[in-house]
Image (cartoon, rainbow, N blue to C red):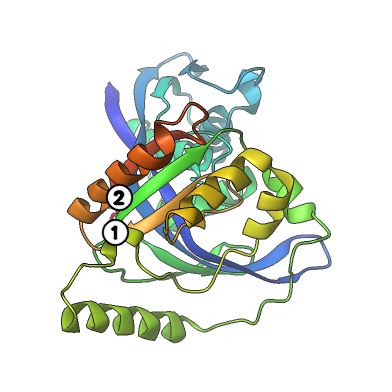
Amino acid sequence: MALYEVPAPAKLNLFLHVTGRRADGYHELQTVFRFIDLCDVLDFDLRRDGRIEREGQALPGLNPEDDLVVRAARALQQATGTASGAQIRYTKRIPSGAGLGGGSSDAATTLIALNRLWNTGLDRDALIRLARPLGADVPVFLFGCNAFAEGIGDVFTEVALAERTYLVLQPHGAVATADAFSSPDLTRDTERVIMPVFADWQTGQAEQIVSDPSDGNSLFGNPLFGRNDLQPVVLAKYQPIQQMALALQKIGFHARMTGSGSCFFIEFDTHQQAFRAQQKISSKILESPRAVVKEHWVCPGLNEHPLRHW
């Protein structure tokens, strides 16, 4: 028995507000998670000996037992008492340390796929409970929908988002999430918003697009709600990321960092606009001898996680 080419999509934080800090050191957040069609791919073969073996492009120096995919598989084994094991192979397309949630998404896909392969029968809420100790972003991939998130980023409300396409740009270098959140310069008192405020803002943007179909300025990307409170902290500390952000700003793009970085995204109404922007950026800042962009993708936004109905 096996499951092959199982997707693990990336996410964007359309905004990320840090609204406080709890006594235990965790930060109170508000954000909107959006899944995008940039996916790692995992294969799972059933093992009868109970062993968990993984093959793939793990981070250099990462002990296999510390790999989130292995930890997720072992958590499901322990919770259910199954005697089954798995041979897991994965192909990484989502860069690490980029704010796209690649490792968390891989862990969530592992829980979903092995729950099916092993016939362990846990429901979505049970899988989310297993996911919480694995990492802050793992639960949203199990939630299965684009989500308005609160708490420490783990209290979800499904949110409907318009069809959009994103140009995602990766600078040189990666960001350690703990470094960004521990910075003394991080703003931790952003005023809280309620979800209807975000929904009303979205509606206003959509009406503006309908009433003015001209795309004369669409090349530069859509305005975005709120901000990312981690962005100024990361830009101050990581010069290659700052260089890319400044280059995008110089040629007029509305770009925002996702999560704790390092990737930035620009939102467009259509694929065509995103591809045109990609071409402009390629001619301006990708083909120079000292290019500040390491990699880039045009990615449609997803309405739901591809494994939502598993």
Nearest to the observer: residue 175 or residue 153: 175
Disc 2 marks which amino acid? Answer: Ala
Marks 2 and 1 in Cβ contact (< 8 Å) = yes
Q: Which mark is residue 277?
A: 2
Q: Are there few (<14), some (14-19), or many (20+) residues within 10 Å of tag 1?
A: many
Where residue 264 sits: x, y (%)? 48, 50
Q: Are there few (<14), some (14-19), or many (20+) residues within 10 Å of tag 2?
A: many
Disc 1 marks which amino acid? Answer: Leu
Specify the quadrant of the image occupied by residue 112: top left
Is 274 on the left or on the right of 254, as rendered? left
Residue 43 seen in the figure: yes
Residue positioned 44% across, 43% down in the render:
169
Nearest to the observer: residue 65 or residue 97: 97
Q: Is residue 14 above or below residue 290?
A: below
Residue 126 seen in the figure: no
Specify the quadrant of the image occupied by residue 28: bottom right
Residue positioned 38% across, 31% down in the render:
118
First in sequence: mark 2 vs mark 1 = 1
Task: Determine the secondary structure under disc 2.
Answer: helix
Q: Which mark is residue 90?
A: none
Distance from Cα at disc 2 to Cα at disc 1? 6 Å
> For mark 1, what is the residue?
219
Nearest to the observer: residue 148 or residue 200: 200
Where residue 190 sits: x, y (%)? 67, 77
Task: Determine the secondary structure under disc 1.
Answer: helix
